[in-house]
């Protein structure tokens, strides 16, 4: 039987490093580092995050997809230690074979969350309109969530239906080893005694 080729990340020195909450500050930092990134080699984007704003995560992910597709850049993802929530949305912008993690990394995948207070005031027709607006916001969020999940599982052994069942029950935490076994990432970085790091598929 032919052995599958080992997938490799082009560099262990990231060209863009993002750390902390997924928010407007991270978005600005991404744009700053993007403008300074070299143009003559494949790029590596490192991410460690406890999560944050889902829409900011989508904005960064969209920029990465446009950069790859229209800028024709080879861009790789390197998750380190923790990639939670909106960080998974960013990771989903990369093809599975270009996603890598250090062996200590933990992923957190969960349903899109909404915190909203609806205060009804005025004529009943107006109140009904406010409720419809809130329902439309929830339905839009569910569509965005499903689209993001579909990008995450593309090329893996996890089906969209399986993923939705898992996160409907509870938040889903995965180690890097589990993510690798289920085909959600292309490789995992280890430390070894012989050479500082090596890659495994």
Image (cartoon, grey):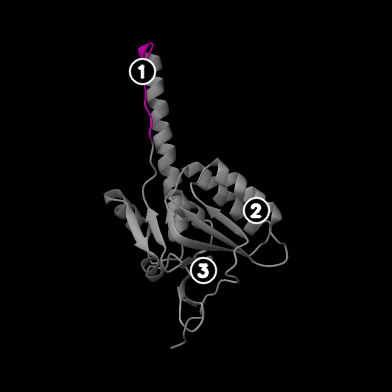
Q: Answer whether residue 94 is magenta in the image.
A: no
- In the rendered structure, the answer to whether residue 162 lies left or right of residue 140 reads left
Residue 164 in picture, x, y percent from top left: 34, 52
- Asked whether, in this view, residue 201 is left or right of residue 39, the answer is left
Residue at point 45%, 74% (across, down): 190
What label sits on residue 97 in the rendered view?
3
- Disc 3 on helix, strand or loop? helix
- x%, y% of residue 58? 52, 47
Cα gap from disc 3 to disc 2, whole angstroms? 23 Å
Q: In which quarter of the image is the N terminus?
A: bottom left
Is 27 situated above or below 174? Answer: above
- Left or right: residue 85 versus residue 23 is left
Residue 171: x percent and y percent?
Answer: 32, 51
Q: Can residue 167 be seen in this view?
A: yes
Image: magenta residue range: 115-124
* Residue occupying the far front of the picture: 193
Q: Mark 1 points at which residue?
A: 120
Q: In which quarter of the image is residue 103?
A: bottom left
Q: Nearer the viewer, residue 93 or 77?
A: 77
In the structure shown, which secondary structural element does the residue marked by tag 2 occupy? helix
**In the displayed structure image, the side of residue 9 where residue 172 appears, left or right:** left
Residue drawn at x 43%, y 57% is 82
Tell me whether circle 3 and circle 1 mark residues in contact (CB < 8 Å).
no
Identify the residue under disc 2: 33
Residues under labels 2 and 1: Cα distance? 45 Å
Q: Which of marks 3 and 1 is nearer the N terminus?
A: 3
* Relative image position of residue 67 (x, y in whole percent): 64, 55
Category of crowding for the residue at label 1, using alpha-carbon neighbours closer than 10 angstroms: few (below 14), some (14–19), many (at least 20)? few
* Numbered label attached to residue 38: none
What is the spatial separation of the Cα atoms under label 3 and label 1, in whole angstroms? 49 Å
């Amino acid at each position: 039987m032919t052995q599958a080729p080992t997938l490799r990340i082009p560099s262990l020195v990231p060209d863009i490093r993002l750390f902390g909450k997924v928010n407007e500050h991270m978005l600005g930092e991404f744009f700053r580092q993007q403008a300074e990134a070299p143009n003559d080699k494949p790029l590596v984007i490192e991410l460690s995050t406890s999560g944050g704003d889902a829409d900011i995560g989508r904005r960064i992910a969209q920029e990465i997809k446009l950069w790859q597709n229209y800028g024709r850049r080879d861009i790789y993802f390197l998750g380190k230690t923790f990639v939670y929530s909106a960080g998974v949305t960013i990771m989903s912008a990369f093809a599975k074979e270009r996603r890598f993690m250090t062996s200590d990394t933990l992923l957190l995948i969960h349903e899109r969350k909404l915190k909203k207070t609806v205060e009804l005031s005025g004529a009943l027709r107006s109140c009904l309109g406010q409720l419809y607006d809130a329902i439309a916001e929830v339905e839009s969020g569910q569509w965005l969530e499903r689209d993001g999940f579909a990008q995450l599982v593309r090329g893996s052994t996890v089906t969209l239906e399986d993923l939705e069942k898992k996160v409907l029950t509870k938040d889903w935490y995965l180690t890097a080893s589990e993510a690798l076994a289920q085909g959600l990432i292309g490789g995992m970085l280890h430390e070894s005694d012989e050479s500082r790091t090596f890659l495994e598929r």
